[in-house]
Image: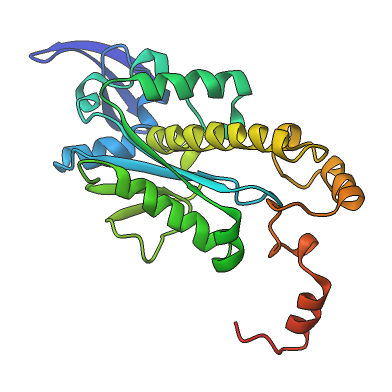
């Protein structure tokens, strides 16, 4: 891969030659940063100005809510590229806590970025299952955006009943900046919730493990028993009588 520069009627551009193909990026925007905005750019070029990235945090833990977020970047970034202060934005799991907090603040304070966050509680998770709860959270976050998103980039597989045109992207939080931004908002919001719940339900270590399946967490459950924010529908916490009922094939669900 090689790079060169040229002057055009639209200013200086950077041209990338990759395996015989030719790609043009706005001046000052390295290809590695521009590429992760490519899904948004393709949709912007089609005239879809409001492209939302959506993601969730908290599907795996044994306790606490699942949180979803949706983020719309300004379509003007098609011409200007990603602002330098957002470079390094990535899947929230790949960022340090310090970097997540930094990007969380930058996303929320940017005057042209629109975002929304939805929290789905433990009662709902146990009633409809975690996957449905996560999808419900994504839908609720998207429904809060005004004006409405015209297209959605989804982290993972296609969501059948999502009420928006969508593009599913497996590992999307590492492939799309708007999905990465949504993952940061969801993760930081959920971590803050779990730290607050740690004060309400002391002894479980929620501030440290955030409800995930750690030896510390299992030891606390063994000692104290489940608390109200534990997900009773999850295997390790499922009541024994319910497990026997389902194993017997008597469940109507």
The residue that appears at 67% across and 85% down in the rendered structure is 251
Residue 103 position in % (x across, y down): 47, 21
- The answer, for residue 1, to whether it is visible in the render is no
Q: Quadrant of the N terminus?
A: top left
The residue that appears at 61% across and 34% down in the rendered structure is 191
Q: Examine the rendered structure and indicate whether residue 61 appears above or below residue 73.
A: below
The residue that appears at 35% across and 26% down in the rendered structure is 34
Asked whether, in this view, residue 45 is left or right of residue 183, the answer is left
Among the 4 quarters of the image, the one containing residue 94: top right
The residue that appears at 30% across and 13% down in the rendered structure is 4
Q: Nearer the viewer, residue 93 or 59?
A: 59
Specify the farthest residue to the left. 9
Among the 4 quarters of the image, the one containing residue 247: bottom right
- The answer, for residue 45, to whether it is visible in the render is yes
Residue 118 position in % (x across, y down): 44, 45
How many marks the image carries: the answer is 0
Residue 35 position in % (x across, y down): 37, 31
Q: Quadrant of the C terminus?
A: bottom right
Asked whether, in this view, residue 172 is left or right of residue 41, the answer is right
Specify the farthest residue to the front. 200
Q: Examine the rendered structure and indicate whether residue 60 appears above or below residue 20.
A: below
Residue 244 position in % (x across, y down): 81, 81
Q: Nearer the viewer, residue 29 or 122?
A: 122
Colour mode?
A: rainbow
């Amino acid at each position: 891969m090689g790079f060169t520069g040229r002057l055009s009627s639209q200013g200086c551009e950077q041209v990338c030659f990759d395996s015989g193909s030719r790609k043009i990026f706005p001046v000052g925007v390295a290809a590695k940063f521009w590429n992760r905005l490519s899904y948004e750019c393709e949709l912007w070029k089609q005239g879809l100005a409001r492209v939302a990235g959506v993601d969730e945090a908290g599907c795996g833990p044994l306790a606490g809510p699942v949180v979803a977020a949706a983020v719309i970047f300004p379509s003007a970034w098609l011409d200007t590229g990603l602002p330098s202060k957002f470079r390094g934005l990535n899947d929230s799991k790949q960022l340090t806590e310090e970097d997540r907090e930094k990007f969380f603040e930058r996303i929320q304070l940017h005057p042209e970025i629109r975002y929304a966050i939805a929290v789905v509680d433990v009662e709902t998770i146990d009633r409809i299952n975690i996957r449905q709860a996560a999808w419900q959270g994504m839908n609720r976050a998207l429904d809060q955006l005004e004006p409405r998103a015209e297209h959605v980039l989804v982290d993972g597989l296609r969501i059948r009943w999502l009420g928006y045109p969508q593009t599913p992207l497996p590992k999307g939080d590492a492939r799309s900046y708007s999905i990465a931004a949504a993952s940061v908002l969801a993760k930081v919001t959920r971590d803050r919730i779990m730290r607050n719940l740690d004060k309400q339900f002391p002894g479980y270590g929620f501030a440290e493990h955030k409800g995930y399946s750690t030896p510390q967490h299992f030891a606390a459950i063994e000692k104290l028993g489940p608390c109200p924010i534990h997900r009773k529908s999850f295997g390790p916490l499922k009541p024994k009588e319910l497990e026997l009922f389902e194993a017997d094939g008597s469940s109507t669900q």
